[in-house]
Image (tube, grey):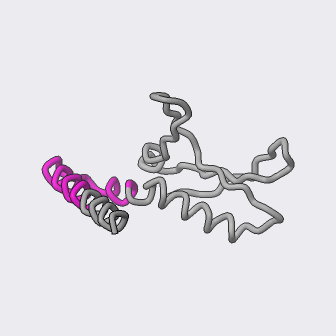
Amino acid sequence: MCCIRRPLAREDGEQTYQIGAEAPALRAAMALRERKRDEFELGPLEVPVHRDNVNRAISQLKKMMAREGVLRELKYRRFYEKPSVKEKRKQRDAERRRRKEERKAQARRR
């Protein structure tokens, strides 16, 4: 699925590990990060390792991947998803997000 590549040296002296993309699905699912308005860059996720604490860096990496939606995208791309099933899933997700926003709005009004 993915691996952690060799440490990268940075100017500030910290080590950074870079995610390696072995599967094409992971490469395609890498997070788009907005640089400027209407300008996107497809790049690797990097996690700084402070004081050789690799376990903490891996947990940060997992959180970052979950936040960016990489793991969910990998799950969906593992097998072929028919267009009709894909559309239904997207509608369910949109409905879930809409209900969540309504709950948040009601909580703010109270």
Q: For the view shown, which residue lies furthest in the front direction?
A: 110
Q: Give how far across and how far down residue 44 sits, in percent.
A: 58, 45
Q: Give how far across and how far down residue 26 sits, in percent.
A: 46, 50
Q: For the view shown, which residue lies furthest in the right direction?
A: 13
90 drawn magenta:
yes
- Residue at 64 percent of width and 65 percent of height: 58
Query: Is residue 35 placed above or below 21 in the rendered structure?
Result: above
- Residue at 59 percent of width and 57 percent of height: 3
Q: Mostly what secondary structure, the magenta segment? A: helix
52 drawn magenta:
no
Left or right for 3, reference 85: right
Q: Quadrant of residue 43?
A: top right
Q: Nearer the viewer, residue 80 or 67?
A: 67
Left or right for 69, reference 55: left
Q: Nearer the viewer, residue 11 or 104?
A: 104
Q: Quadrant of residue 53?
A: bottom right
Q: Give how far across and how far down residue 21 sits, in percent.
A: 54, 49
**How many marks on residues?**
0
Quarter of the image for the C terminus: give it.
bottom left
Left or right for 56, reference 2: right
Q: Give how far across and how far down residue 37 sits, in percent.
A: 49, 29
- Residue at 67 percent of width and 55 percent of height: 47
Segment colored magenta: 73-96
